Image (cartoon, rainbow, N blue to C red):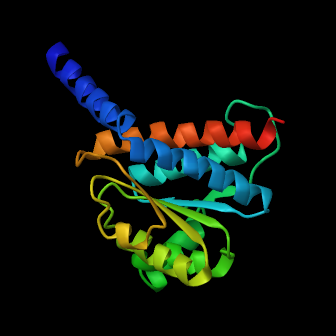
Amino acid sequence: MNQKIQEIINESLTVKSLVLNDLRLVGLVGDLVALITDRFRQGKHLYFCGNGGSAADAQHLAAEFSGRFYINRDALPSEALHCNTSYLTAVANDFSYEVIYSRLIKGIGKPGDILVGLSTSGNSVNIVKAFETAREKGITTIGMTGEGGGDLKKWSDYLIDIPSRNTPRIQEAHMLLGHIICQLVEEKYFTP
C-alpha cells in the first residue's frame, strides 16, 4: 500500500515538475496575473465554470477572489457560474445541459470580462459553447485543460494546458496554478 501511495505522489510531483520547467506556462501565468489585475482595476468581472471536480475547483478559485486569499481586503468581482442550482436545473431541463453556461454568459457577461473554463479533456461541450458566446461578446477566455487543450484550444484566448492526460494530476496542477494566480493578483491589486 505504501508503495502505491508513493507512486501516486510521485506522479503528481512529475506533472508539477513538468509545469515548473515549462517556461511558456510559467510566463503565461505571469501574463494572466497582469491581465486579471488590470481587468479588476477596470471594474470587470471574472467568471469560472467547470463540471464535476472541475466545477468544485472553479468554485474554490472564484471564492479565493471574492473572499480572500492571504490578505484581509475587499471582495473582488468573481463568481462560479454553476452555484445557482435553480438556474442550472431549470436550463438543463428546459433547454439542454450543453447551454447552461453560454446562456448565463450571454445574460450577464460584459465586454472585457474574463471567463475561465476548467475542463481536463478540453472537450466539455457546455464550456466550449460558453467560450463561443464569450467570444461573440468580447469576453476574454482562459482555458484550463490537460495536454493539447482539446476543443477549448480553438476558443481560448489563453490556454493553460497541463502536460498530462491523467485527470486527477491535471486538476492538482490547475489548483496549483490557480492558487498562484490568486495570490499574485491579490498582492498586485492590493499592495501599493
Q: Quadrant of residue 64?
A: top right
Q: Position of residue 127 (x, y in %)?
A: 43, 69
Residue 123 appears in which quarter of the rendering? Answer: bottom left
Residue 134 vertical placement versus 5 (above, below): below
Q: Residue at x 19, y 14 (%)?
A: 2
Residue 154 falls left or right of residue 165:
right
Name of the residue lying farthest toward the top: 2
Residue 45 horizontal side relative to residue 171, left or right: right
The quarter of the picture where the N terminus appears is top left
Identify the image quadrant of the C terminus. Answer: top right
Provide residue 14's location: percent of width, then percent of height. 26, 30
**In the foreground, 95 or 105:** 105
* Image position, residue 120 (x, y; %): 33, 54
Please report the residue visible at 72 percent of the width from the left and 56 percent of the height from the top.
38
Q: Which percent across, then down, holds residue 147?
A: 27, 53
Q: Is residue 164 visible?
A: yes
**Which of 109 and 137 lies nearest the eye of the viewer?**
137
Determine whether, in the image, residue 118 is placed left or right of residue 34. left
In this picture, is 9 found above or below 60?
A: above
